[in-house]
Image (cartoon, rainbow, N blue to C red):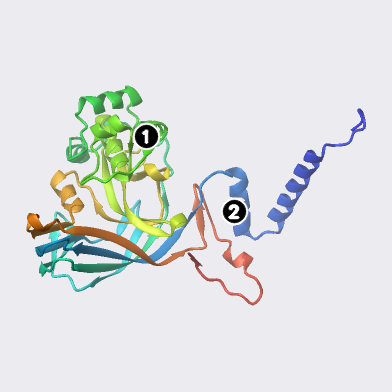
C-alpha cells in the first residue's frame, strides 16, 4: 500500500462488515434473539447452561461371588428427593423404580433409605439390583459478590455447631490445614472473599487425579499429594473453609459427562454465605468442573452431609457381605446407564435467560427437545 493513499487495511474492513452484520441481526431479531446477541456481545466468554434438563438413567448395583459362596449381602442406598434453593425447585424427582422391589425402607436422620438383602450366592455367580431415576433439574446461579456478603461472625450458631469441627476426613483442626487456610485467606472475614480465594488457590495448585482406594483422601493427604478427584478436592475445600470459619459440607450424587456420554458418581460441596439482605444462601461449588456459585443441571444429589461423620460414612459404604475369606472376597461394582437426556431450549447465564428455538425452526419442521 502506498503511503498517503488513505486506503483502510483489509482487517479494518472485515471488522466493520462484521459490526454491521451484528447490528443488522440485532435490529431484525426477535426480542429473545436480541437478548441472546446482547448477552454474547456483553460477555462472550461467560458460560451458558440449559435452563432445565430432564433425564432418566439406570443405576446398577452388582455383587459377584469370586471364588466361593457369598453367605449374605446387603445393598443400602439413599433416595434422592426434591431440592429447593432460594425458593426455586432445582431438583424434582419425578419417579424412582426399583428392580427387584426393595426389601426394606427406612428413614435415618431425615434421609430416606432403601435396602436389598439376600443369601447364598454360589461361587462364580452374581446378583444385580437396579434403580431407574427420572429427574428434572434446573440450573441455579447465585448472583452474589463480596459486596453482598457478610462476615464469619455473622454465620448462624446452628451452622457453626454443625460444621465448624472435624468430620471424618475433613480435619479443620489439623495444623497443616489450619496453616494452609491462614496462608490463603490471612485475616479476611468476608465469607464470599474467603470462599473465592480458596477456590482460586485450589484451581491453581490442586490437580485432578483418580486412584483406587477404599475411601477418599483426607484433607492432610490432599495437602501432601496436591492431587485428587471430586471427593478428595471437595473434602480439602470444606476443611480449608471450616478452618477459616465458613461452614462447608459435601453434597453427593451422580453427574452426566456429555462429552463422554456417561454418568458417574460425583461429589461437590455447598457452603453458607450470610447476606446483608436476607438470612443467607447455601451455595454450590464444584471444583473439578470449575463451577463457583453455579449448580449445573447435569447432576442429581441423593445425599447432603449434615455434619455427622457417622451419617456421611453410612452413605459411602453402600455394600456389605459375609463370606469365607479363604475362598475369595466378593466383587462389588456400581454403574450408571443413560436412558434419556433432554435439555430445554432456554439457556441461562449470569443475568440472562433466552429461548432461540422458535426463531430457528425451518418450514415444515417442529420444535423438539435437544437430545444427546
Question: In the structure shown, which secondary structural element does the residue marked by tag 1 occupy?
Answer: loop
Q: Is residue 316 visible?
A: yes
Q: CA distance from mark 1 to mark 2?
A: 35 Å
Residue at the image position 32 percent from the left and 27 percent from the top: 189
Task: Identify the residue under disc 2.
Answer: 36
In the rendered image, residue 98, in percent from the top left (x then y), is placed at 23, 71
Q: Is residue 239 left or right of residue 193?
A: left
Percent across and percent down for residue 172 are 22, 32
Q: Is residue 114 left or right of residue 23?
A: left
Residue at the image position 42 percent from the left and 40 percent from the top: 144
In-front residue for pair 338/326: 326
Q: Residue 56, how many percent across, how many down?
A: 36, 67
Instruction: Please give left or right for residue 180 compared with residue 344 in the image.
Output: left
| Numbered mark located on residue 206 in the image | 1
Give the crowd class for mark 2: few <14, some 14-19, many >=20 residues within 10 Å.
Answer: many
Please tell me in which quadrant of the rendered image residue 222 appears. Answer: top left
Earlier-in-chain disc, 1 versus 2:
2
Rendering quarter of residue 159: top left
Relative to 259, does residue 8 appear above or below in the rendering?
Answer: above
Determine the residue located farthest toward the bottom in the rendered image.
Answer: 364
Instruction: Where is residue 327? Give x, y as percent.
Output: 10, 58
**Can you tell which of label 1 and label 2 is closer to the viewer?**
1
Q: Is residue 89 visible?
A: no
Kindly identify the residue that appears in the image at 41 percent across and 35 percent down: 203
Say which residue appears at 52% left-offset and 71% top-offset.
368
Labels 1 and 2 touching (C-beta < 8 A): no
Q: Quadrant of residue 163?
A: top left
**Image quadrant for the N terminus?**
top right
Amino acid at each position: 500500500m502506498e503511503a498517503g493513499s488513505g486506503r483502510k487495511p483489509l482487517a479494518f474492513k472485515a471488522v466493520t462488515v462484521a459490526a454491521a452484520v451484528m447490528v443488522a441481526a440485532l435490529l431484525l431479531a426477535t426480542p429473545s434473539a436480541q437478548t441472546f446477541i446482547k448477552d454474547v456481545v456483553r460477555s462472550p466468554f461467560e458460560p451458558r447452561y440449559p435452563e432445565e434438563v430432564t433425564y432418566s438413567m439406570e443405576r446398577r448395583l452388582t455383587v459377584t461371588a469370586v471364588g466361593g459362596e457369598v453367605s449374605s449381602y446387603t445393598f443400602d442406598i439413599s433416595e434422592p428427593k426434591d431440592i429447593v434453593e432460594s425458593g426455586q425447585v432445582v431438583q424434582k424427582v419425578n419417579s424412582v423404580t426399583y428392580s427387584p422391589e426393595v426389601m426394606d425402607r427406612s428413614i435415618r436422620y431425615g434421609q430416606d433409605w432403601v435396602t436389598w438383602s439376600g443369601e447364598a450366592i454360589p461361587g462364580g455367580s452374581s446378583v444385580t439390583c437396579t434403580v431407574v431415576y427420572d429427574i428434572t433439574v434446573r440450573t441455579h446461579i447465585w448472583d452474589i459478590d463480596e459486596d453482598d456478603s457478610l462476615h464469619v461472625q455473622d454465620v448462624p450458631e446452628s451452622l457453626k455447631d454443625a460444621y465448624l469441627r472435624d468430620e471424618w476426613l475433613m480435619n479443620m483442626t489439623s495444623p497443616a490445614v489450619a496453616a494452609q487456610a491462614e496462608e490463603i485467606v490471612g485475616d479476611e472475614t468476608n465469607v464470599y472473599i474467603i470462599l473465592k480465594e480458596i477456590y482460586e488457590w485450589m484451581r491453581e495448585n490442586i490437580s485432578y487425579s483418580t486412584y483406587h482406594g477404599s475411601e477418599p483422601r483426607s484433607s492432610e493427604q490432599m495437602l501432601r499429594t496436591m492431587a485428587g478427584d471430586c471427593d478428595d478436592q471437595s473434602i480439602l475445600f470444606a476443611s480449608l473453609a471450616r478452618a477459616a470459619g465458613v461452614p462447608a459440607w459435601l453434597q453427593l450424587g451422580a453427574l452426566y459427562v456429555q462429552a463422554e456420554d456417561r454418568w458417574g458418581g460425583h461429589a461437590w460441596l455447598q457452603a453458607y454465605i450470610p447476606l446483608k439482605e436476607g438470612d443467607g444462601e447455601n451455595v454450590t461449588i464444584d471444583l473439578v468442573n470449575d463451577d463457583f456459585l453455579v449448580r449445573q443441571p447435569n447432576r442429581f444429589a441423593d445425599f447432603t452431609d449434615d455434619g455427622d461423620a457417622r451419617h456421611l460414612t453410612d452413605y459411602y459404604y453402600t455394600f456389605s457381605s459375609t463370606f469365607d475369606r479363604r475362598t475369595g472376597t466378593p466383587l462389588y461394582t456400581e454403574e450408571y446407564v443413560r436412558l434419556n437426556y433432554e435439555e430445554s431450549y432456554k439457556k441461562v447465564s449470569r443475568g440472562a435467560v433466552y429461548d432461540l428455538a422458535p426463531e430457528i425452526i425451518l418450514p415444515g419442521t417442529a420444535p423438539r427437545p435437544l437430545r444427546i
